[in-house]
Amino acid sequence: METITNFLEMGGYAVYVWPSYLITAVVLIGALVSSIRFLKRNAETLKALQEEDKGEA
Amino acid sequence: MLHRFANPARFMRLSGVLLPWMAGAAIILVAAGLYMGLFVAPADFQQGESVRIMYVHVPNAWMALFSYTAMAVASAVALIWKHPLADLAAKSSAPIGACFTFLALLTGSLWGKPMWGAFWVWDARLTSMLVLFFLYLGYLALYNAFDDPTRGARAAAILALVGFVNVPIIKFSVDWWNTLHQPASVIKMGGPSIDSTMLWPLLLMAIGFNFLYFWVLLLRMRGEIHANKIRMIRLRQVHG
Amino acid sequence: MKRKHKRLVFVIIALVLLGGAVGLVMSAFEENIVFFHSPTDVVEKKIKIGKRLRLGGLVEEGSVERKGTRVMFRVTDLVNSIPVVYIGILPDLFREGQGVVTEGLIKDGVLEADEVLAKHDENYMPPEVADALKKSGKWDEMSGAVKRPGPGSGSGAKEEAK
């Protein structure tokens, strides 16, 4: 238990160390998720348009 | 040679094969880097535990420069050889590069406060890094500022090339002028001045971030190729 | 010449010219790009009294005196040194022999600083390694830098002394 508290305290630098890791994780995962969504949305729109095209032809 | 890989259909096939490998490598390397950096690596002799900020700050900063260099090279290829995929690569590199730059500035600030005594100083390294962030934002704004996307692409590519002079300035700022930021520890003459117990987690995180960059880049490029096709079909529908 | 070759040559020439122009501008404004001046700069250039100045160097060994929150110390570049007084909280890395950047006004040869920043070098190692280096005499106590063989030798000390 004491070792966990010690670890989380980061030698008194917890307020600087943990936000650095947390914000990096949030921003990079956010960039990844938004890129996956961007690809998915475009792939779906394209598929719908191509089927519509075929239907007309 | 260039044109063999440059065909969008071929790119879709190749990137589809590469994507899961990029994702796997990024996740494994970053997980290993986090474990090594937080649990295995020792505290620093003068900075104590605060040195662990290095394992996110330095990879973010390296990737900020890497993404910009990739964006500038792709922009040059797009301008000179009029290559459509190069243009998409440059455009897709910008958002993730801007994220890395923002994170390098922010984590640097969180490291600077306890060690230097200030969140921010206007020294050559920090200022040139802030300029890099504005270059990314300017690139993205310029790309979307025109009704005709090819004109936006060309204007943004020229900005990316002009802004590239900032990259060597950032790298060598700590050698050319006296700064509050310390000189390079890893990529320097005479080998790294960082203990191997700290160098390993740093390299794992950096290579992991590199794979993350290519993961996001390929996702965005695929998305952009779809977007181009959507635009073409819609144009045909309007005119046809 | 094909059009793409023309464009290639044009881009290369433009980048070289741009790089040259930026280089010239930066060398012209060097005074404004440096973050701090060394004690030798201040002594030799006789910087005007009444102008704010950043002074950087090492905290001279044995020079730190504290009276409550008031701290007095000397900043040295191993050639010249200038006394500094400061009232306030010092950064964690402020130590004798450590790099420091102070900002304020010079009055009667003393820098009255309202800001003190710590500057550390590019060496990272666990405390045990640092102790071992000190014991084996491979440690330059004055500069806080590790002496290492090869072209990068004593770069910490050199950077500070510049």
Image: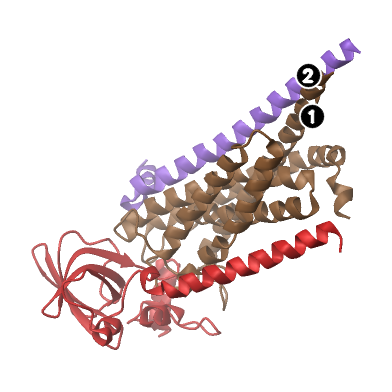
Dot 2 or dot 1: first in sequence order is: 1
Chain letter for mark 2, please: B
The colour one sees for chain B in the rendered image is brown
Does residue C106 appear anywhere in the picture?
A: yes
Which of the chains bears the disc numbered 1?
Answer: B
Q: Which chain is red?
A: C
Q: Residue visible at 26% across and 61% down?
A: C91
In the image, B156: left or right of C39?
A: right
- Residue B149 location, x and y as percent? 69, 37
Asked whether residue B207 is in view, the answer is: no
SS type, badge 1 = helix
Give the crowd class for mark 2: few <14, some 14-19, many >=20 residues within 10 Å: few
Task: Identify the residue under disc 2.
Answer: B238
The residue furthest right is A57
Q: Colour of chain A?
A: purple
Is C13 on the left-hand or right-hand side of B239?
left
Q: How is the image coloured?
A: by chain
Marks 2,1: beta carbons within 8 A: no
Numbered mark located on residue B229 in the image: 1
Whether residue C93 is situated above or below residue B87 in the rendered picture: below
Quick one: B35 or B16, which is closer to the camera? B16
